[in-house]
Amino acid sequence: MAEPSERNLTLQQVATILQVETSTIRFWEKEFAQFLNIKNKKGQHKRFTEKNLEVFSQIKELLYTEQYTIKGAQRRLEMERTLTSGLGIESNFKTTVFFMFSAILRELQSYREESRKLAEQVRALREEKIKVEEKLLEERNKGLLDFLKDKIQVKKVSEQEEA
């Protein structure tokens, strides 16, 4: 059996495993070079380690499933690297922290959306209140005589319709 360092994958193998195009792997390799540390011997085809495959898989997850932008995925990988190396946090704990952080962000987003909807409802209610107040003011300003004239006319029209 080959040593782990000897089990290197070709570009095509990595693309097949991740179910993406080879051009996508090349693009990710350029955009996320600081996280991949790919060592290539001059004159030989590039080979990717299992660690590289893990990073590519994580990149795919961030971009495709979690809908991160390239910059956002880079920041996320950098935060993860900082947590892992700088603080010496275990992978499981790190994953838990990120899931919790992601859940908190999703919850905040839903609260923002709910708040926006409530603000729209308040605005609509204020507009309705203004309309009602204007109608009340109109009615109040109508003289009693005008009010009675309107009532008499309505009664005459209804009597004519009955006749």
Image: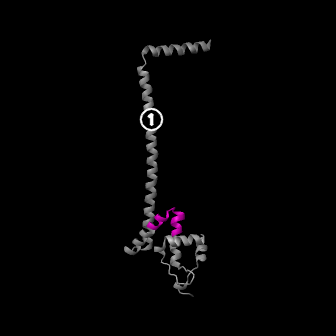
Q: Where residue 19 sits: x, y (%)?
A: 60, 70
The extreme front residue here reads: 43
- Tell me which colouring the rendered structure shows: one colour
Q: Is residue 46 left or right of residue 132?
A: right
Q: Nearer the viewer, residue 163 or 137?
A: 137
What percent of the width, then of the height, locates residue 161? 61, 15
Q: Quadrant of residue 125?
A: top left
Tell me the quarter of the image containing the N terminus: bottom right
Give the amino acid at mark 1: Glu
Give the residues in magenta: 59-75
Choose between 99 and 40: the one closer to the eye: 40
Secondary structure of residue under mark 1: helix
Q: Residue at x 50, y 73 (%)?
A: 55
**Residue 63 colored in magenta in the image:** yes
> Within the magenta stretch, is there residue 139?
no
Furthest residue in direction left, as rendered: 87
Q: In this view, which residue lies farthest toward the right?
A: 163
Q: Which residue sits at x=55%, y=72%?
A: 26
* Image vertical order of residue 26 relative to residue 145, above or below: below
Q: Residues within 10 Å of mark 1 (few under 14, many from 20)?
A: few
Horizontal and vertical percent position of residue 12? 61, 76
User: What main secondary structure does the magenta stretch of the protein show?
Assistant: helix
Residue 122: give x, y in percent of width and height: 43, 40
Number of numbered markers: 1
| Residue at the image point whose x is 46% and y is 33% from the top | 128
Q: Please name the residue that numbered disc 1 is placed on.
A: 127
